[in-house]
Amino acid sequence: MPTETTVETPVFLRNSERTTYRECRLHWQWKYVRRLQAPTARSALSFGRVAHKALELYYPPGRKRGLHPAESFEKMMVAEPGITSQWDDEGNRHDPTELGVAMFNAYVDEYGDDDHIEIIAPEMPLAVDVYDKRGNYLCTWVGRSDACYRDLSASNRKHGDRLGFLEHKTAKQIENNLRVNSGYGDQAEGYWWGGSIVLKHRKLLKPGQSVDHVLVNWLRKGMPDTRPVNFEGHRLNKPTKDALLAFCASQDIFVPKKPTVPILSGIITELGFDPAQLGEPSKNQGSELF
């Protein structure tokens, strides 16, 4: 029953606490029973918090998108002088503001307006009272989804609304295969269970329906890869002189004596071809940003 608990001293159970309990009972005891915390906030968590806020402003209720997240992120970082340099998965060090702005510019370039997404509520709070079989109160499960949304590409009259939750994550690496017993899988499982109860209570889901999915929206900490891409989607190295000469020969293009790579590239460009496409696919294709 997703109502406010009526007990005098509610016991709140959060996803983070469940995960910590599974991973290390001693860590759980220190953090949630003895209330021991690290003296300083971790820079990575602060970076992620600002990124979450930028996405919250970008995804307001409805289908129309808000302020560009790169602009929001840059403005909010002015008030966050304590966030230090961030590191990507290859060990490169980045200025946090420059990194975040680049990530969000690439994010919008990748997904555009996301016009199939209709936000029902950003930062939706979730709470479900949990009782045993005899009706004794045990705890109140609580969570806060980054957004509850309607997937317009899959919703229809026959099958009804397809509702899901968005969970934004900034990290060095993207966890492609979420497990139920991992931190993020555990969170998704809780949102699917508790979120379905809350949405039914709010009349957003009909009896028998449940949350369709939890979409983990990964943003990997990394600068956009500016290398050219061929029609197969492979990142290309810079074309060699031999490759440019071979192309000119195949097209009967006049080549001056002792041509350099810039000269050959200029000739090919003037004739309406893209010399960058003559590079070989790189052995290092890089990691997906999103």
Image (cartoon, rainbow, N blue to C red):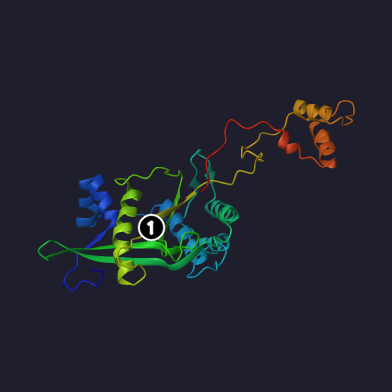
Q: Position of residue 8 (x, y in %)?
A: 16, 73
Q: Is residue 173 left or right of residue 232?
A: left
Q: Nearer the viewer, residue 99 or 121?
A: 121
- Whole-percent x, y for residue 230 in the image: 66, 39
Judged left or right of residue 256, residue 245 is left
Judging depth in this view, the residue of 3 and 289 nearest the camera is 3
Mark 1: secondary structure: loop
Residue flagged by tag 1: what amino acid is it?
Answer: Asp
Quarter of the N terminus within the rendering: bottom left
Q: Position of residue 25 (x, y in %)?
A: 20, 47
Residue farthest toward the left in the current orientation of the protein: 134
Within the image, what quadrant is residue 24 found in? top left
Q: Position of residue 104 (x, y in %)?
A: 55, 55
* Residue 223 vertical position relative to residue 5 in the rendered view, above or below: above
Q: Is residue 279 visible?
A: yes
Viewer-nearest residue: 140 or 16? 140
- Between residue 109 and residue 115, name the one nearer to us: 115
Is disc 1 surrounded by few (<14), some (14 to 19) or many (20+) residues within 10 Å?
A: some
User: On the picture, is 194 further left or further right than 263?
Assistant: left
| Residue 34 visible within the image | no
**Count of numbered labels shown in the rendering:** 1
Q: Residue furthest front?
A: 158
Judge whether 270 appears above or below 105 on screen: above
The residue under label 1 is 212
Residue at image position (49%, 61%) is 55
Residue at 38% x, 62% y is 145
Residue at left offset 9%, top offset 64%? 134
